[in-house]
Image (cartoon, rainbow, N blue to C red):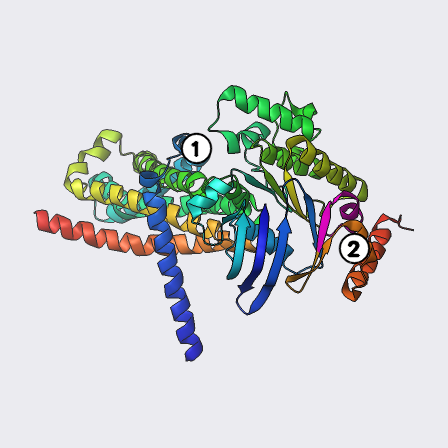
Amino acid sequence: MKHTWKKVLANVETLGASLQFFAKVCLHPLRHRFEAGECLKQTVSVSLRSLPTTMVAGLFTGAILAVQFYIQLRDFGAEAALGGLNTSGTLREVGPILIAFMLAGKVGAYTSAELASMKVSLQTDAVKCMGIDPIGYLVVPRFFAVASSAVVLLSFGLVVSVLGGATAAYLIGGINLTQYLSMLPRFASMEPVVLAVSKAIGFGVLMGYICCWNGYHAEGGSQGVGEAVQKTATQSMVSIVVMDFLISCLVHAWMQFTH
Amino acid sequence: MIRFTNVHKSFGAKHVLRGLNLDIGAGEAFFILGGSGTGKSVALKSLIGLLRIDEGQLHYNDRDITRCSEEAFTEIRREVSMVFQLPALLDSRTLLENLNLPIRHLASKTRWERIRSALKATHLDVYRNDLHQVYPTSLSYGEQKRMALARSLVTQPRVLLYDEPTTGMDSETAKEIHQLIRSVAQLYNTTSLVVSHDITNALATADRLAVMHEGREIFVGTADELRRSPHPIIDAFLTSSHQRERRTAEPRR
């Protein structure tokens, strides 16, 4: 019992420290020099590296959903609703979460491994010894790069997923683009778009925070790097699911309130 | 110039520094010797603010830096530079970006002058024209260590801290690095504080040495005084170090 209590306390302590770290990273540009060039360089690098993955993931996410919906709707002769239903479903749920998982595995793990190997090979200490704050120089640009590029990539991936759905609908059911988009306003109103954008922002910030925290606090050689990457992948995916639920509830409540 | 007064430092239950006292003069090449886990690296890291001591006092240039803020240490780090056990070059950056990093606030012309001078001092002139396209990983380990030293030199530090600069090197390269420590100290007029296991080269290079055992100094003096020391621990340390070095130097049969 005492051991469990100690473990719980240690976890609460870690959570507190990580939130403090998050606040420090977010507020750093306001208090200190913002490494704009470094941030831009990282953002371009992360975005370009992940663009093909996002495109493929987005395209097939929309396509898979379109195939599944088409099979179900055909039984009721409601194929006309495919475009609206598929776009709404992709934007609301499947698109953001699948693409976010993909990005967590690629961008999050990469950034975490990069920071962790810098930490264990003393590069972080070396930067500190040059009179440069490693949080400002190494962490902040990566955090903003991961967060902003995740938002851009997720949004881009969602657009591609809608196109993927339309393509699949044409190939399987012979539904052309005009037919596909005709039912869109009935199903896909403002809510799915707000949900998709909110999730893209939320997941992006979450990924940036988790990968930077784990990478920057890695210890103990190559094993430490491996642990940081593993923690980043696991924590990102679990947190994305939890955040997905929270954002869905919040946006739904907000929509109810405004109507 | 640098003074450790009764310095203590613990990591949990492990008491690493147990009352370390050292006084290092300006321009000295001062070596700290001792077995693994005696707190040599901890002493260096405390001096540059990477670790904070629990008890005692640290002085740099007659200024008490024991409880200095992080901002104050940032200022100190412009004068005190450290060369790590690993090269610690940013491997995602080119050599030029690495060398520019600590002096990026300076004018371009000054930066180039300092970089050229540091490359010359560390015998890395050969990379002078390729700095912008070569990454640290394409250099040999010894070259990476020298490049790390060059990166420290561009700031024209008053004090250079070396944390086991010859770890993982063959005896010839280790000798070269020690000669470099000496020549750089003369060229840049710096104080060198070196933590080392390499007893032979340390005896040849140091102005003065300290031997640490269980977190405190048990000897401070010149190389000759060290050789004559009757202290049993020093005698055992010198004997085991010499035997180890002889074994490393002997070709395998």
A75 lies left or right of A64:
left
Hey, which residue is sitting farthest left in the picture?
Answer: A259
Q: Specify the quadrant of the image occupied by residue B67.
A: bottom left
Q: Residues within 10 Å of mark 1 (few under 14, many from 20)?
A: some
B63 lies left or right of A155:
right
Taking depth in this image into account, of B116 and A91 the one nearest to the observer is B116
Q: Is residue B205 magenta?
A: yes
Taking depth in this image into account, of A35 and B73 the one nearest to the observer is B73
Q: Is residue A146 magenta?
A: no
Disc on res. B226: 2
The boundaries of the magenta stretch are B197-210
Above or below for B234 versus B197: below
Instruction: Give the position of the N terminus of chain A as an image quadrant.
Output: bottom left
Residue on which disc 1 sits: A38
**Cα–Cα gap, marks 2 and 1:** 50 Å
Looking at the picture, how far across and down is residue B138, in whole percent?
66, 33
Q: Amino acid at mark 2?
A: Leu
Disc on res. B34: none
Q: Amino acid at mark 1?
A: Glu
Taking depth in this image into account, of A99 and B154 the one nearest to the observer is B154
Looking at the picture, how far across and down is residue A119, in whole percent?
53, 48
Q: Secondary structure at mark 1?
A: helix
Looking at the picture, how far across and down is residue A111, in whole percent?
47, 43
How many marks the image carries: the answer is 2
Residue in view at x 68 percent, y 30 percent: B187
Residue in view at x 83 percent, y 59 percent: B239
